[in-house]
Image (spheres, grey):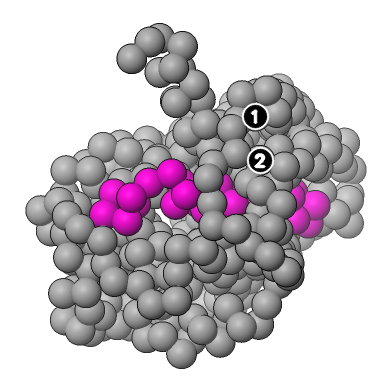
Amino acid sequence: MSTSSTRAGRSPLLFIFLTVFIDLLGFGIVLPLLPIYSKAYQANEFELGLLFASFSGMQFLFAPMWGRLSDRIGRKPVLVGGLLGTSASYLLFAFAGSMPMLFVARLLAGFFGANISTAAAYIADVTTPENRAKGMGLIGAAFGLGFTFGPFLGGELTAYSPMYPGFLAAGLSLCAALFGWKMLVEPPREARTHSRVFSLGQVRHAWSDPRIGALLVLSFLSVVAFSSFEAMFARFGLALFPHEFGVDVAVERATMDQILAAAPITGRYLGAIGILSAIIQGGLIRRLLPRFGETSLALAGQAVLALSLLVLGLSQSWAIVLLGCVLMPFGFGLNNPSLSGLVSRATPVAEQGAFLGLNQSIASLARMSGPMIAGLVFQRLGPHAPFLFGASVLGLSVLLALWYHRRFAATFPRGRPAPVEA
């Protein structure tokens, strides 16, 4: 194979990786800024959770639309157009000077970032059913790296100016859009005549098929729990362990200069979790899948996630907090690509975009619900409460994952396609 053909074959997957990476970079870049908003705009924990949730709320509403639209007009225009809109939303975020403007910027970022479902559909278009979870592992790695570098860069750049993270996210989105416009090739896909942008039939199909419906519930529960951690970890640390964040007093009494100085440390802690998650999803998952299968790994991932949040919820020292943070990316890294692969293998080939869009929409609903609930229980019950809430949610998820493994593992045989009914 020539060098030019190899490069052409790799560039589409590189673009998909960049698209998801940039979407998650922008998603995570706000995390170290939440305590700053709390101080600057007198926002309480629930309001911060709502700001965090606004991004995912728009993804929940519009992920199915982007997925169906990509089935109709193609993956490339949806992916490139979404990146252009994302760039504009982060410019607005950089210049936002009030909570209402921040909410508008996050809503727009969520609207255009809902095209992650199209990225997943692109992977499904170019992979075989038995290798699809491995392809989803590429998206999982981009999730992990975006979550790594988003908080890290957000924290480091905020030390210079709170505007810089928005400028960086906008510039990266624009560069990725230009790269995709020039290099991305539309993948072969099933012809779809008379396709509508959204169909409630997809929802009815999903919930009438227990193989699909149970997976959507599992995805919802695990993301609710994980997003509760994402939204409140910085606030939790600054309230109970301020010295570990370079602050002498809890965040309620810290000065703005102290909170700005703590932002890079917050990003570094969250970045370390992202690095582990990316390594697991991008590498370890490829070795484990052929041996154990998706249903087993999804069950293990749910259980490890539950344990990590329970450890955090019961922690009384920073060493125990770090233990929970080390366990968490192992659970997330096993769970996320396994569930995505199972959803893809259980859905009709001609409607991959729609069903993966529905799955992304369910996950976005969870990322919208989790931070709001976490902020409320933090405000009412204290800093440990969001993590105990997440652990209890995942306890239910583990039971469902065990039932799913026992009932459906045989319908997803390792090494060959699963039967799919149209």
- With respect to residue 334, does 197 lie above or below? below
The one nearer the camera, 268 or 379, is 268
Q: Mark 1 belongs to which amino acid?
A: Gly
Q: Marks 1/2: CA distance?
A: 8 Å
Mark 2 neighbour density, 10 Å: few (under 14) some (14–19) many (20 or more): many
Q: Tag 1's secondary structure?
A: helix
Which quadrant would the C terminus be assigned to in this image?
Answer: bottom left
In the displayed structure, does residue 376 sit left or right of residue 238? right
Above or below, 365 relative to 340: below
Please, what is the three-letter code of the amino acid marked with disc 2?
A: Lys
Q: What quarter of the picture does the N terminus occupy?
A: top left
Q: Residue at x 43, y 44 (%)?
A: 126
Point 89% across, 43% down: residue: 97
Kindly report the secondary structure that dominates the magenta region of the rendered protein.
helix
Residue nearest the viewer, comparing 119 with 60: 119
Q: Are marks 1 and 2 in contact (CB under 8 Å)?
A: yes
Examine the rendering and report whether any part of residue 9 can be seen.
yes
Q: At which x and y percent is residue 2?
A: 38, 10
Asked whether 132 falls inside the magenta stretch, the response is: yes
279 in magenta: no
Label 2 SS: helix
Residue 312 seen anywhere in this rendered image of the structure: no
In the rendering, at what x and y percent does residue 334 appear?
Answer: 27, 55
Kindly identify the residue that appears in the image at 44 percent across and 26 percent down.
Answer: 9
Residue under circle 2? 76
- Say which residue appears at 60% left-offset and 39% top-offset: 186
Q: Position of residue 156 (x, y in %)?
A: 59, 26
Give the residue pinned by disc 1. 180
Residue 79, image x, y percentages: 67, 43
Residue 305 placement, left or right of 92: left
Q: Give the range drawn in magenta.
A: 106-133
- Taking 208 as reference, is 276 left or right? left
